Amino acid sequence: MRVMNMVFSSVVLGLACTLAGCGENQTGQTSLTVTDKATVDNANKATRVFFNGDIYTVNKQQAWAEAIAIKDNKIIYVGSDEQVEQYIDAQTQVVDLKGKMMMPGFHDVHIHPMESGSDATQFTIPAYGTENEYINAVYDAANNNPSAQWLIGYGHEVSTLLEMQNTPLEVLNDAVSDRPVVIMEQTSHSMWVNSKALELAGIRSDSVDPVGGVIGRDKSGRLNGILYDNAGELVMEIAMRSLQGSADKDYQGLVEHTMPMLNEVGITSISDARTYWQRGQLDTWQRIADDDKLTLRVALGLWAYPQMNDEVQLEALKKRYQNKADSLLKVNQVKFYMDGILVNTTAAMHDPYHVNILGLYGNKGLNYFTQSRIEKYLKALEPVGFDFNIHAIGDRGITEALNAIENASSKQNRHRLTHIEVMDPQDYKRFAEIGVIADAQVAGDFTHPNHWAEMIPFLGEERAYDLVPIKSLIESNAMLTLSSDWNVSTYNPFVGIGNAISRAPQNITLEQAIAAYTINSAYAMRQEQLVGSIENGKLADLIVLDGNLFDMTAAQIKQTQVVMTLLDGEIVYQR
């Protein structure tokens, strides 16, 4: 092999050493000079060449390759070690992959990077604690944050609160009564608040439930301190606006911590699944882009506020649309909630829940947005160019969202339903028929078949099984994407892939799982012509792994490490 016989002009430890598994503290790069006469003119010589690898392209026409050549930010050759030599000159950086696997960078099309990486929360409580543990934790948080206008926490689990001897409101009031306290539940679908928070939010026993939310009450009709879904969102909005310097903290958190963490696991593109534009989050993202700090391709999903006047909101969303071809930052998606979640009994169901927690009419969950209202937004925002990312967990929520798209969409857009946990089997085929993307999250253990029985008390045995039916959807020709919903689940794609191939009876193949995290998700972000697979002319968003996924068990895949991540041909992470 002629490439292997090239003459070294200089060798400094770095990329090649990293790929070979040398000492972690060594830095630098490797340069090679070619002595053979090249057959490609100088204008097409590569900036960087990778050879001697197992390169999985996610391109069905050429699934595997040994080498690739990159010129600046574009892939100019995919093929054999022998043929890649013609793209090398004295200026080309040549990297020996040492047999390691290279593949396209991952896309995560449902993630909450600003929320999950924020330090806005001052304390965390255990999901399953005692009343005294909670009181002590909140009391300590108050002492540790004496100047905070609001005490903002995270971590409770609703069932634990409902099983306490005293009401959640009484417990929180015992801890802190002179300042407002709000604690977000792990999925963000409920907030635990004290009386001061209720007072500042104007919530009383006779208050009417807001659209998409429920004000928790005890059997006597008195407030119990739990605000479900949008009722809690409204209070959290007030709390967040009280924070000082939050925009700078969000900026630093994204640049210094969150984006590097995502690059470290091979993520090169994301869709922010809930950008609170009224909180200034869009401005923070734009500032990062203007400062040339992005190490990801980012599509923002502007949050559709359920309580906002439609005409006012539609105009506000239209003004914020942004889809510049040369920008890493796009503002071209809108995030809607069709319903809530199963464990709150707020996910929208065709048939009643088997338990009645909230006393909702029919006990079939709730809607943030109704089918007719989604149709109104489709007609107004599709012509602008927006794609919809619609949270739909219950079977009724999924059916109504599909109905809305079938009735009102031009079918030219790339809308997706995300979560899709409980489905009416009759809706499987509708995804392909209507052209809707099915986005699922299986990285969390709670979606694994071992945990399905936990839903029996809520749904009954028949509906509790086959949750998140990704195999059935693929068999019905749906386009599937896989994502994390971090921080509800880990952002690590390898965990999601490992779970996706092992969650029988709703498991899929490794090829299908990788496609769901790469080319399919690139399609959902309208960039499949640019990234998502390794092909001539595409941009060099690439990752190198410490092993070949196709040689591993599901458990081993979850432990995979990324050796190097490139975005647009530049290294953004190196192990």
Image (cartoon, grey):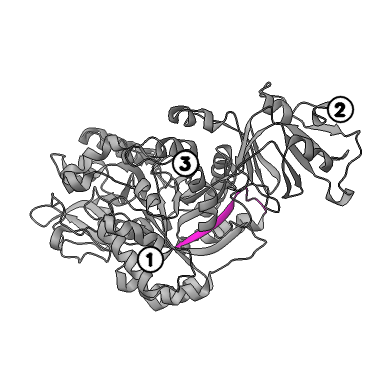
- Which residue is outermost to the top? 23
At mark 1, the secondary structure is loop
Question: Would you call the spot at circle 1 few (<14 residues within 10 Å), some (14-19), or many (20 or more)?
Answer: many
Q: Which mark is residue 491?
A: 3
Q: Tell me the mark number nearer the camera, choosing from 1 and 3.
A: 3
- Left or right of residue 278: residue 429: left
Q: Residue at x 24, y 43 (%)?
A: 465
The label shown at residue 8 is 2
Q: What x and y, as percent, mark residue 117?
A: 48, 45
- Read off the magenta span: 292-304
Please name the residue shown 27% across and 66% down the image. 211
Q: Which residue was labeled with disc 1?
A: 305
Graded by Cα atoms within 10 Å as few (under 14), some (14 to 19) or many (20 or more), the crowding at tag 3 reads: many
Disc 1 versus disc 2: nearer the observer = 2
Residue 20 point in image, percent of width and height: 68, 24
**How much space separates mark 2 and mark 3, taking CA atoms?**
40 Å
Residue 467 vertical position relative to residue 24 in the rendered view, above or below:
below
Q: Amino acid at mark 1?
A: Tyr
Q: Please name the residue shown 19% across and 62% down the image.
A: 204
Magenta span includes 305: no
